[in-house]
Amino acid sequence: MKRILTLLLLLAAALQGYSQTQPAPQTYSFTVQEAVDYAITHKDSVVNAGLDVKSADYRVKEIIGQGFPQIDGTASFQDYLKIPTTLLPGEFFGAPAGTFIPVKFGVKYQSNLGVNASQLLFDPSYIIGLQGRKTYKELYSRAYTSTKIDVTARVTKAYYQVVVSNEQIKLLDANIAQLKQQVDQTTAQNKQGIVEKIDVDRIAVQYNNLVTSRENTLRLLALNYQLLKFQIGMPIEDNLTLKDGLDNIKIDENIIETVADTASYKNRIEYKFFETNLKLSEFDLKRIKAQFLPTLKANAAYTFSYQNNSFKDLYSASFPSSYIGLTLNVPIFSGGQRTNRVRQSEIALQKGKNNLMGMRNGLNLQAEQSKIIYQNSLQSLNNQKRNQELAREVLRVSKIKYQQGVGSSIEVTQAQTALEAADNLYIQSLYDALVSRVDLDRAFGKIQ
């Protein structure tokens, strides 16, 4: 028993120590733009895209370094357990012709220390690589921008989802409050014998359903907050509240008239990314063609040789040697490999041009679709607003008629159900309008 108690105390102490090392949850309150700004600096996909830009910069420096002098140090050591034997003609030593005398040349221990250097003097592939380094860096820079745009759109949509869910909670609270009042009134009237018990039950069923709907919506709201924190790269355990509500979010009905024309594809980062890829394909074709040209390189070396039959005296004397020279490499025949590589690169370049044309048409179509979808969503939102107001008015009149004895409880229940349906359609239309506005801005290159 004492052992168990001791183990529990140790475990409790360990857990307490672990909890103390964990950072305390932070609390944040963001507008839409602040949420986007937080995501740009914390979302893993954006951070990694920024690291890719840095990596591309180092890759360019690596390519540039190929044109600098290349210097290597070398060192070698050999212990000849058996010195190689060479056969020399016997007549050199007065022996009969056709005989050979075994002779050993060399010493047991040999060592070499040297420095080799080379300098690229002319290489067309290297020159073309230098010409394309700016385009190469531009490719990753645009990939970084594309990632930021994608994250901005997703964060904005997630933010709007929370805003709309909050609005839905408000509508449910208002409906629950007025329905609770109606339940209390009907219950009191039933006790007085004015209305039947079935009227109380009908309203109670609606009230219970509405309360359950609110509880479900609250759980979904908590999940939407978690999704928003995930989209901006915030730890799930941190607390987040929103500064912006529907009053701060403008749904501009005139935005269609101010967006760009059908040439909006030029503002899209996707199109610019394809353009950069096409430029790189052109440089690649030039690089492969340059492989038909000769290359020239300067070489130099300085070596210290050490030889001795005694290991301890191996480095007592050196025999230096050095040279300088040029190496010219002239491509003559490669079995058609270079020619076929050129043809493959030309095909890849043509495919890139075709893809660019397809991208332009696709982006223009996307822009037109986004305009139509946004217009339709605005029309649906306005229609649902009117329906919501009408449903609320129908419910008001139905309740008055019921109280005056010229209406039925079924009529009130149906009007309440119609109002709840109108509220749900309004919430859905509101979210659709907000999301389609984000898609519209993205389709016309307004998100950067």
Image (cartoon, rainbow, N blue to C red):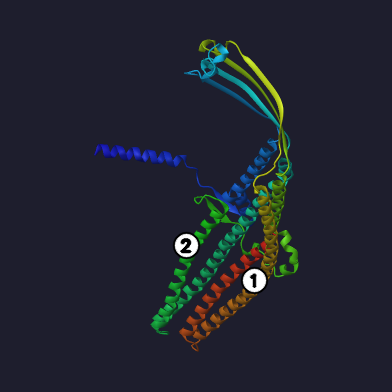
Q: Residue 54: x and y, percent?
A: 64, 43
Q: Which mark is residue 373?
A: 1
Q: Nearer the viewer, residue 412 or 114?
A: 114
Residue 40 lies, in percent from the top left, at 62, 50
- Residue at 62 percent across and 22 percent down: it is 114
Q: Quadrant of the C terminus?
A: bottom right
Residue at image coords 51%, 73%: 178
Q: Quadrant of residue 69?
A: top right
Of residue 98 and residue 282, the one placed in the foreground of this image is 98
Quarter-of-image position of residue 293: top right
Q: Quadrant of the N terminus?
A: top left
Residue at the extreme left: 1
Q: In the rendered image of this protein, does residue 193 appear above or below residue 74?
A: below
Q: Is residue 278 left or right of residue 15?
A: right
Where does the image place residue 374, in percent across and percent down from the top left?
66, 70
Q: Secondary structure at mark 2?
A: helix
Tell me which residue sits at (69%, 49%) in the image: 284
Q: Is residue 31 visible?
A: no
For badge 2, the amino acid type reads Arg
Please tell me which residue is depicted at 47% across the width and 77% down the height of the picture: 182
The local crowd at label 1, few if under 14, some if 14 to 19, many if 20 or more residues have their Cα within 10 Å, is some
The answer to whether residue 305 of the structure is visible from this angle is: yes
> Is label 1 in a helix, a strand or a loop?
helix
| Residue at numbered disc 2 | 219
* Residue closer to the observer: 400 or 159: 159
State the residue lying farthest toward the bottom.
406
**Relative image position of residue 426 (x, y in whole percent):** 58, 72
Q: CA distance from mark 1 to mark 2?
A: 30 Å
